[in-house]
Image (cartoon, rainbow, N blue to C red):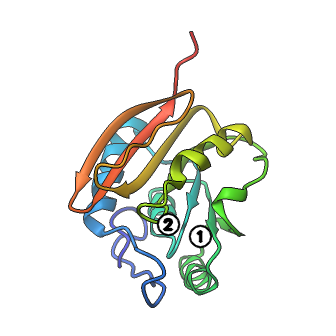
Amino acid sequence: MRIIAGQWRGRKIEAPPGDITRPTTDRVREALFSMLASRLGTFEGLRIADLFAGSGALGLEALSRRAAHCTFVERDRTAIKSLEKNIAALDAAADIWRGSAGNLGPASQPYDLIAMDPPYGSGLADKIIANLSRQGWIGPSSWISVETERNATVAGDGLTVEAVRQFGKAQITLLRKNPTP
């Protein structure tokens, strides 16, 4: 796996061994970041959360594009070791929350972009989005990207689905907070 664009373009990142994680393919990552760039304009200075981080490919891609900081959330020890190596190799501005994305506590401030890639078929996305909303992770200008299996429905109270794109077995859903009337 490689970083697609930005200051670390072309740099290799290590994926955890085995089949515990399912890294987002380069093609899907490239499409996702193209979708986000057209909506955000720039990643410069953004706070990112990468849930079910695995290798950290999504968060590291955002950091490569000048995001200010990324909080990675991962519970698998093998994946955390790969993630730590990737963060250290790139000297990335990041921290790792070691635990379940379903048990996140209060955020000190909302994140600009939350990327999550829960296990396919788990149905976890909506539950986690609801918890993130309650815990202050999602603010008025937050974007949420969810990778699921093809044809999955992702929604969230108070959120609008901005885009849904399918790539083979994968589907990306972009959501954002409903505008306040």
Residue 106 position in % (x across, y down): 79, 47
Which residue is at 65% across, 66% downward?
94
Which quarter of the picture shows residue 104?
Answer: bottom right
Residue 41 position in % (x across, y down): 40, 38
For label 1, the residue is: 92
Q: Quadrant of the N terminus?
A: bottom left
Question: Along the horizontal axis of the image, is 74 left or right of 29?
Answer: right
Residue 163 position in % (x across, y down): 33, 37
Which residue is at 26% across, 46% downward?
165
Which residue is at 48% across, 85% downward?
16
Return the residue found at the far top.
181
For label 2, the residue is: 60
Question: Along the horizontal axis of the image, is 137 left or right of 161?
Answer: right
Three-letter code, disc 1: Ala
Q: Is residue 79 above or below residue 115?
A: below
Front-most of 14 and 150?
Answer: 150
Which quarter of the picture shows residue 10?
Answer: bottom left
Q: Quadrant of the C terminus?
A: top right
Which tag is nearer the camera, tag 1 or tag 2?
Answer: 2
